[in-house]
Image (tube, rainbow, N blue to C red):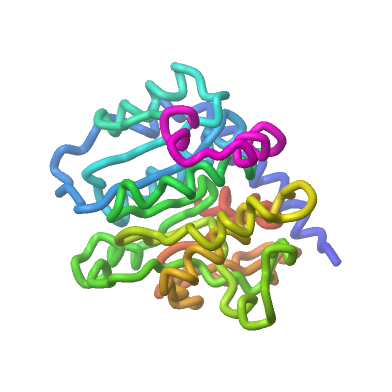
Amino acid sequence: MASIAFHVMRRIADWRRRRFVARIPERVGAPDTSLPDLPLTLLAFCGRRDFPEQVASWLSFRRWVGRPRRSVLVSDGTLGEPEIQTLRRFEPRLEVSSLEQFGVAFASDRMRRYAEAIPMGRKLLVMRAADSLAPCLYADSDILYFPKAAELGTSGFWNRSAPGYLFDPYPSLDLRLIHGEAERDSPVNAGFLVIPGPIDWSEPMRRFERMEGEPVFFTEQTLTHLAIRGSGGTALVPKRYILRIEDQWLARDRFTGPEVALRHYVSHIRYKMWMKVPI
């Protein structure tokens, strides 16, 4: 049950987001050329609705991790030139792609229809092509980084041959694509992926093309789950790479402590992100 403190916090979080949006031009500043280039690509998929979250996320990445050698933003078609120029103020090398430019080589007719129907179908096009940028970090716009995220830029972290992912304690799978209980184990949340090399999409896409009925919201995450797990992917340490919503109704953020690298502020708890973003 929500407390009075919770409702007060929600109002404060809304105000903080509006304040952040009003100050974006001064928040992004100029590019910091003193930061060393990280040997990785940072990939995002974003639209105008989540643009403030994307800016806050990338600012926290720059602060605690560093400057990726490539930053690739795939627009859902709603980002305008003002938003793109804002991002280029602190990352002049930003590469902006449309879905047609980025995912067209992998798009079957069914994938195109899925992309036209719902946003997660459009994200599938991005996921399907992400390993073309490896070594790559894919991150949703509602990911916030903390000091321990510095490990994401180290050679030791990238001394891996298989993908890493956020463990999803609340599995959200399209069961039409799942063959047996074992395939439901160690569920993947597609909000943050470590992609060191190629991903094998052959079996997931075969199932997708043969699936009865229309794809739904979680079809994309299920396909990503199958592809990542089928490529030997392992979950990042859940106590450091956080996806939790048990504190949804609490005024404080229970899960961000000194050992945390990042938290995925999914829709249930998005307001908590704005209590952590400097304004």
Q: Picture quarter containing residue 222?
A: bottom right
Q: Is residue 48 above or below residue 44?
A: above
The residue under the point 42% across, 69% down is: 231
Q: Is residue 26 magenta?
A: no
The single residue placed furthest to the right in the displayed view is 1
Residue 223 position in % (x across, y down)? 58, 58
Question: Which span is picked out in magenta?
Answer: 99-118
Q: Nearer the viewer, residue 184 or 169?
A: 184
Is 132 displayed left or right of 50 in the figure? left
Looking at the image, residue 194 sits to the left or right of residue 274; the answer is: left
Residue extending furthest bottom?
A: 182
The quadrant holding residue 3 is bottom right
Q: Position of residue 9 (x, y in %)?
A: 69, 53
In the image, taking residue 154 as reference, residue 152 lies left or right, namely right
**Residue 107 falls within the magenta-colored stretch:** yes
Q: Position of residue 88 (x, y in %)?
A: 32, 27
Query: Where's residue 110, x and y in %?
Result: 64, 40
